[in-house]
Amino acid sequence: MSEDPTAASGTLSLMERHQFAALYAEAQQHRNQLRGSSQLAAFFPPDSQSLPPVLGFGLPHDNRPVPVVTIALNASVGEFSGGHLPIEDDVQAQWVAQANYFANPYEGWWGIAGDMLGAATDGRLTYAGPGPIAAHVDFTGVVTTAGMDTTYDPIKARARAAVRSWLERSLTGTFVQLLSSLVQQNGTKAALVFGFAPAFPGKQDRSGSITLRDTFWGENERVNFVGDGGVAGERRQPTISWGRMTGRSVPENLRRLPFFFVSQGPSSLFSGQRDEVTRVPLRAAAAGLAARLVAALAS
């Protein structure tokens, strides 16, 4: 894989099906290799079904504006068991379904994500419209049988190293290409990350998902984040920050893209109670980013 994520296939346009197919094939191959690793058996039990890769949600087939892209760790198996995405590991079926995803979303997760998106953009954007809409891309397109973060937490150091290698390949193999395309072809002006916040001046440790904290550690030189400022959460409240993407595998347009972070995302509530009260801290944290994010959209 080229160190410049756009060098291998030229300018990537999501309106071109063959480009989606190439990235989908890369994610399929990667998934198959991961499923064959004994170190990763907790993520892919031997009797589990091989799930289609999910490159993104609401990915455009044309050059319509996508002002904001939201980002999280990976898609849930519930997308398939709930009938929100087809179980067929077929590029054409997934090309259509992933583009039109928000016609039938997995409401438990996406309802919370939509609240956070709306708060962070001061009500300017939604996933489904009417009006301006956002798209979503995950750090890895590989879908695990169980929750990725909860499975990662108890595993041993050697297996954790294998997961970090997995995330590094996903980041360089598909993620930066998709996000770079959205910036170039669809005018994306900001990215909003759920479940992770990098260190920033005054707060020297990373916050959020244990998987992502370990992925974006200080010695990761290929794809990483630098926090320029933020507000540390108190008493288990979310931390928010803003910053940029760095690393030798990051194209120039992503180095210039403003990133905004909330250390907790929809998945932090997903295994527990998800009533209106539990959403308040996430919505409030996202609203704390609104002034800066809206300014980025106006620039």
Image: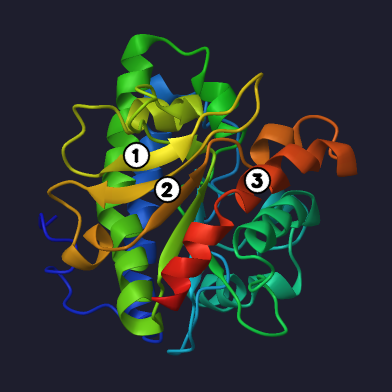
Residue at (48%, 75%) from the top-left corner?
67
Residue at (51%, 77%) from the top-left corner?
92
Could you tell me which secondary element the residue under label 2 belongs to?
loop
**For mark 3, what is the residue?**
77
Query: Which quadrant of the structure image shows residue 252?
Result: bottom left
At label 1, the amino acid type is Leu
Q: Nearer the viewer, residue 112 or 29?
A: 112
Q: Is residue 150 above or below residue 212?
A: above
Q: Earlier in the sequence, mark 1 or mark 2?
A: 2
Q: Is residue 94 visible to the viewer in this orientation of the structure? A: yes
Q: Is residue 45 visible to the viewer in this orientation of the structure? A: no
Mark 1 in CB contact with mark 2 (< 8 angstroms): yes
Residue 296: x, y in percent? 42, 67
**For mark 1, what is the residue?**
167
Q: CA distance from mark 1 to mark 2?
A: 6 Å
Q: Nearer the viewer, residue 271 or 290?
A: 290
Lateral position of residue 176 relative to residue 111, left or right: left
Could you tell me which secondary element the residue under label 1 belongs to?
helix
Q: Residues within 10 Å of mark 3 (few under 14, many from 20)?
A: some
